[in-house]
Amino acid sequence: MITIFHNPKCGTSRNTLAMIRNTGVEPEVVLYLETPPSKTELQALIDAMGQPVRDLLRQKGTPYDELGLADAKWSDDELLDFMVAHPILINRPIVVTPMGTKLCRPSELVLDILPQPQQGSFTKEDGEVVINDKGQRV
């Protein structure tokens, strides 16, 4: 089973979802802006990624600056509270597979944790070829 925390308005998230589907698998799609993860779930995702909480904070198009989140005074616990209160602060897409959990920025990072191979070529929305016609990473 594969889960993607997805924002359909985000090109990186759309490309990541398309690469998952290019393996022939239909993932569980969590529209995290509509149904955000709980603080406990968010902490578990961060722990599984092995990344600092701050690495998951999204700045662009969010209240990051307005809330003063660049200030080192905020603890990880407080940053998690901000992300739960303002899910737009959660960077995306986050993908969970049996092979690991990863923030897939850039989108082709998802290829490192997909258990099934790509079934055909794949070109990102911006025209960049990621998978050739033999299903191999370019």
Image (cartoon, grey):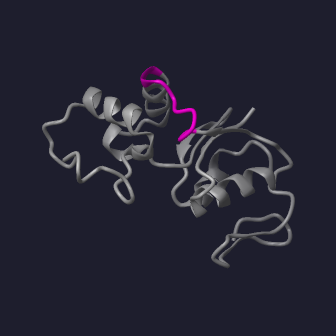
Describe residue 124's horizontal placement relative to residue 43 as left or right.
right
Give how far across and how far down residue 128 sits, in percent: 65, 76
Give how far across and how far down residue 54 sits, in percent: 31, 43
Where's the C terminus, which quadrant? bottom right
Give how far across and how far down residue 102 sits, in percent: 54, 43
Residue at horizontal 33 percent and vertical 29 percent from the top: 81
Name above or below for residue 22 compared with residue 82: below
Residue at horizontal 66 percent and vertical 58 percent from the top: 14
Front one among 19 and 39: 39
Outermost residue toward the bottom? 127
- Res. 5 image quadrant: top right
Name above or below for residue 76 compared with residue 5: above
Give how far across and how far down residue 108 sits, in percent: 62, 60
**What range is drawn magenta here?**
32-40
Q: Is residue 52 magenta?
A: no
Where's the N terminus, which quadrant? top right
Front one among 1 and 37: 37
- Res. 76 image quadrant: top left
Describe residue 40's horizontal placement relative to residue 81 as left or right.
right
Name above or below for residue 54 compared with residue 75: below
Name above or below for residue 56 compared with residue 76: below
Front one among 136 and 34: 34
